[in-house]
Image (spheres, grey):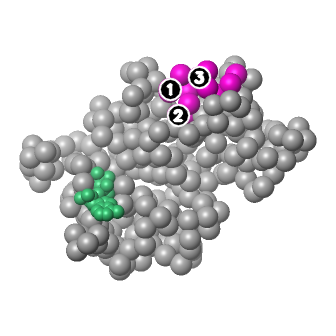
Amino acid sequence: DVSHNVLLYLEGISVSFDGFKAINDLNLYINDGELRCIIGPNGAGKTTMMDIITGKTTPDSGSAWFGQNINLLALDEPAIAQAGIGRKFQKPTVFEFLSVVENLELSMEGDRGLWSIISSKLSGEQRDHLDKVAEMIGLVEQRALRAGSLSHGQKQWLEIGMLLMQRPRLLLVDEPVAGMTHQEMDRTAELLVSLAGAHSVVVVEHDMDFVRNLAGRDRTVTVLHQGSVLAEGTMEQVQNNRKVVEVYLGE
Ligand code: ADP
């Protein structure tokens, strides 16, 4: 029984590589506006799950729906991005020789990004959105700086901003705090929490202190193991789950 505000719906998803089941009857429901943390030991299937949601990998069986009636398994990668699913990979891939603003302009929805740089003409509405994004990612004062001169954390936030320029409904974020200072990690948690509500955010992360910070007391944490959901609940619930403890002790 799926509630009416489910945004992403994966059911009975399986995929094998050379006979090895990387994803094994996976069921996952992400609500509209939810911030969900996904954890699990190496090889649990987290990356493969993200690849399936974004159309990079096609599952052998199961169904995947987005929004009211978008069948993700019928779409290719660009069409899935177009439908409102943005993915941030672990390493930042900003254009180092362009300014913060130029990076954001380039990422604008549709094909207007490049044109806006050439013509320096953005509509008032586009300008407002860019200003809002620069503020959300905390890079207002750095707007004119070359992206290459930013800190590692700032580059990660800029890349999240580049995704936000496309107004996604769902953001998939892969290990955002790898290599960050503690202060940058805290700011990243604040940023991701601030995105929830207006967006759904799925964060795959290894750093347990960060997950604890991000999930707080009430948010749902999903534990993947051997390609399916081992446990789901608040951080406190999953930490005290015997099966979860066994899996992590065995790592
Ligand atoms: P995680 O991201 O949780 O560490 P992955 O999704 O990367 O896990 O991998 C799940 C399992 O599937 C691993 O055992 C991995 O070796 C295997 N796997 C992933 N992608 C491929 C592939 N393209 N070919 C063969 N095996 C793969």
User: Looking at the image, which residue is at 56% across and 40% down?
Assistant: 93
User: Which of the four quarters of the rendered structure image does ligand 1 lie in?
Assistant: bottom left
Q: Which residue is mark 2?
A: 156
Q: Element type at marker 2?
A: helix
Can residue 6 be spotted in the picture?
no
User: Looking at the image, which residue is at 29% across and 31% down?
Assistant: 209
Question: Whole-percent x and y of residue 42?
Answer: 24, 49
Q: Which residue is mark 3?
A: 150
Q: Element type at marker 1?
A: helix
Question: Whole-percent x and y of residue 51?
Answer: 43, 61
Question: Whole-percent x and y of residue 208?
Answer: 28, 36
Q: Which amino acid, by three-letter code, is at mark 2?
A: Gln
Judge the density around disc 3: few (<14), some (14-19), many (≥20) Cα neighbours within 10 Å: some
Judge the density around disc 2: few (<14), some (14-19), many (≥20) Cα neighbours within 10 Å: many
Q: Which residue is mark 1?
A: 152
Can residue 162 be spotted in the picture?
yes
Q: Which amino acid, by three-letter code, is at mark 1?
A: His
Q: Element type at marker 3?
A: loop
Q: Which amino acid, by three-letter code, is at mark 3?
A: Leu
- Magenta segment range? 145-157
Disc 3 versus disc 1: distance between alpha carbons?
Answer: 7 Å
Of residues 3 and 130, the one nearer the viewer is 130
Judge the density around disc 1: few (<14), some (14-19), many (≥20) Cα neighbours within 10 Å: some
